[in-house]
Amino acid sequence: MNAGYPDRFLKLFEKRGEPATVVNGAIFKLYSGMVVPFGPANADYSLTRAEASRVLRSLGGKVLRTTTGFQPARGASEWYAVICRAFTPIEDVRSSQTRNELRRALRNCDVRRISCEELARSGYEVYRRAFDRYSGPETPISASEFEVHLMAGEGFEDIIHHWAVLCDGVLAAYGSNYAFGQTEATYSAVKLHPDYLKKYTSYALFHKMNEYYLGERNFAYVNDGFRTIRHRTGLQQFLERKFSFEKAYMGVDVIYRQPYRTFIRATFPFRNVIGKVDDRARAIYELERVARATRMRA
């Protein structure tokens, strides 16, 4: 970790108007109605019940999820982050097909870091069109909201990085990442314009970002996020198959505010029926199932 955590991130979230708080030196913030820890995935974010209740009241969340950091064995939990620990140069990639795809990607695309202002000015079309391939419940924000959100990051280039994929000078894809010292680079947002996928933009973007963080800057690992339980894009499987990402398992727990705790306990036996008509509920029940299984193994 670095001296910028948690203070620099709290200043960024304050500028964005995103609720966040600190407990035991770790940031917790509200995300889609759920309170989650914000920081490198290898850290332990366990809370006592009293601490969890205070965080939920402070941020107005209904559910809080905590994790325990990476564990040496898979069997202790079904929860994981999808990470990569080492950069693989093209000539060392085992699959000849993947080597050819990467070479084609680098011929077609120019990948470089860009400023908040550059992405705010030219990124909205890629952001909006990326939803054409997305079947989840979220919808795009407006162009003005997109610009305001990105420009709030101006001056925070030490902790948030933006990457552009250019095809013939046109923005075809981008990635936005959080940097936690040299411990973790979190690949927070990746947006791909569907019209340029045949140029292998995703290959170019991940190859160059991995090269920078793992090959040049010697980060401990890069992280594409936690196990997906609400919507599936296939991205994590793609990264495992093409870029040697792996599942880093960890313990997980989930705590609810009342009356949601009572409701979840009472309706859990009927989760399969309820989940068929409400995808958000299905995801919460699956998280609860994994947390219960983790407690039983402990």
Image (tube, rainbow, N blue to C red):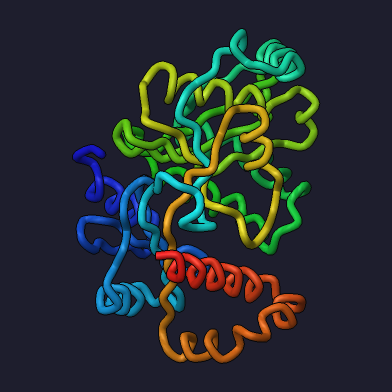
- The structure residue drawn at horizontal position 35% and vertical position 76%, both measured from the top left corner, is 56
In the rendered view, tell whether residue 29 sits above or below residue 271.
above
Q: Where is residue 10 in the image (x, y as percent from the top left)?
A: 28, 53
So how many labels did they put on this image?
0
In the rendered view, tell whether residue 266 sits above or below residue 207.
below
For residue 141, side relative to residue 183 (left or right): right
**Which quarter of the image is occupied by the N terminus?**
top left
Q: Where is residue 295 in the image (x, y as percent from the top left)?
A: 43, 69
- The structure residue drawn at horizontal position 55% and vertical position 49%, both measured from the top left corner, is 146
In the rendered view, tell whether residue 246 sits above or below residue 14.
above
- Can residue 30 be seen here? no
In the rendered view, tell whether residue 114 sits above or below residue 105.
below
Q: Where is residue 151 in the image (x, y as percent from the top left)?
A: 43, 43
**Which quarter of the image is occupied by the C terminus?**
bottom left
For residue 213, side relative to residue 168 (left or right): left
- Can residue 243 be seen here? yes
Q: Which of 234 and 198 is in front in this view?
A: 234
Q: Which of 192 and 280 is in front in this view?
A: 280
For residue 29, side relative to residue 231 (left or right): left
Q: Name which quarter of the figure residue 21 lies in.
A: bottom left
